Amino acid sequence: ATYGLAITGNAEFGGAISGVGALTVSADAEFDGAVTSTTSIAVAGTTALNANVETTGTQTYTGAVTLGDDITLDGAAITFSSTLNDSAGDTHTLTITDSGATTFSGIVGGTAYPKSITIDGTSGTATASAAVTAVTITVNAGKTLAMGTNTLTLNDDLTINGTLSGTGAINVSYNLTIAGTGTLSASGAITLGGDWINSGSYTGAGALTIVGSGTSEIKGDNTFGSLTCITAGKTIAFENGKIQTVTTVNINGGSAHGITLQGTPGVFDTSTLNYWILAAGATPGITYCDIKEGRSSTYIGWASDAASAPYNVDSYYTSFFFNTFTWTGAAGGGGNWSTDGNWAGGYAPPDATASAPTFITIPNVTNKPVLSAAVTATTITIASGSSLDLVDKTLTDAAVTNNGTLKLHGASGQIAGAASVTYTAGTVYYYGGTGLTLGGLNDVSRRI
């Protein structure tokens, strides 16, 4: 038979404990030897954990708990009713392998934070009812750390292999990693000093503020409520080919070229347009920055580093593409569509894709655009008095709003895909060629 052990008063266990049923201590307890093959533990007073504790059932620590060594707690429903601290601060690790629900009712790391906390096990939720501070925290696959409205502070890294949820602030001095099996559901303020690595799932659209020196990489497709950085000298590197959707942007370098925004470090290939994408609100507040290898949904309202630049882009070695393109015809050259200098900002539009649409406006200027190659676009608006000449090139997928003149040479299938043409007072002018098939002209009802 297995017998329980009830101690009235303080208890110091200098050696190992094994084969006990329910172990209860009515006052303070100190465990200097490992506890194994024990049914449950309940300590009413403070607890000094200097050795591992393994139970088949519950562990309840009612008073303050102090880690005196690297500790593993293995049980089913482990409860910390008061505070949890390291004995020296940034010294000892705590691994909790709990097949049930873990409860942190008091502040964790308030006076001396653990070197690391690992939430382990195959299932169950660890719930924090107060602030948690550690050097690093790892939430392993199958486990959930529910922070509620409470603040989570990491003086190093946060690694999420399982699930982390909460509406309170998350402060990470170095890297925040959401692994492929991980989920972060956080709608509060997030402060980050290192890299944001999202290989899993992030929901909540929290407010991300990037601090610290050096480079912070933002990896994966992400949606943020806001993105803020006002640290001069900082570099933010967005992963190429990924989309950052942000409602409000406030990135201010403070003075000329104060912050650098770029794509994946060491990867820059303008021939393939392997750029990162910032899908921001209508007036993203990006000022005093070098912008490299990227694309934004708009550049309305951006300030410039120099009076000679229309926006804050270092044109010497920058390939920064916008979703919104306006024809100027400034470079002339017979109105060549593909000439960068014929477009506001100095870049001709790349072909549109589902994840990178292009919105093109052709105002009434002296030099009108003429296609030099096939084009795929999302929308094209031709202003009154202006024109677009397709020659014999194919225009694919574009919704054309024609208030001026759309010229067609007449090649078969010249307007293809999901393309359509609508207008209020425009003209479609057909010239030359034979065998014209215009699959997108269903909306044309005025004159050809």
Image (cartoon, rainbow, N blue to C red):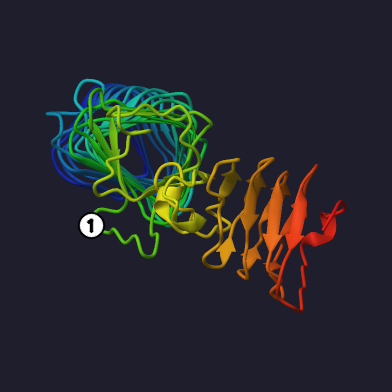
Q: Residue 282: horizontal and vertical position, in percent?
A: 53, 31
Where is 434 relative to 401, above or below? below
The amino acid on which the numbered mark 1 sits, given as a three-letter code, is: Gly
The image shows residue 138 at horizontal and vertical percentages of 32, 45
Q: Which residue is mark 1?
A: 266
Q: Secondary structure at mark 1?
A: loop
Instruction: Tell me where residue 21 appears, x and y as whole percent.
Output: 37, 44
What residue is drawn where x is 31% and y is 23%? 83
Question: Looking at this view, is 45 or 23 the one in front?
Answer: 45
Can the viewer see residue 239 in this picture? yes
User: Residue 408 falls in which quadrant of the image?
Assistant: bottom right
Residue 336 seen: no
Taking 80 as reference, is 305 left or right?
left
Q: Position of residue 153 (x, y in %)?
A: 30, 29
Quadrant, the C terminus: bottom right
Toward the bottom, the furthest residue is 435
Q: Quadrant of residue 26?
A: top left
Residue plotted at (58% across, 47% down): 360
Question: How many callouts does the rendering have?
Answer: 1
Q: Depth check: 256 or 110 in front?
A: 256
Q: Dot 1, crowdedness within 10 Å: few (<14), some or many (≥20)?
A: few
Q: Is residue 430 above or below residue 160?
A: below
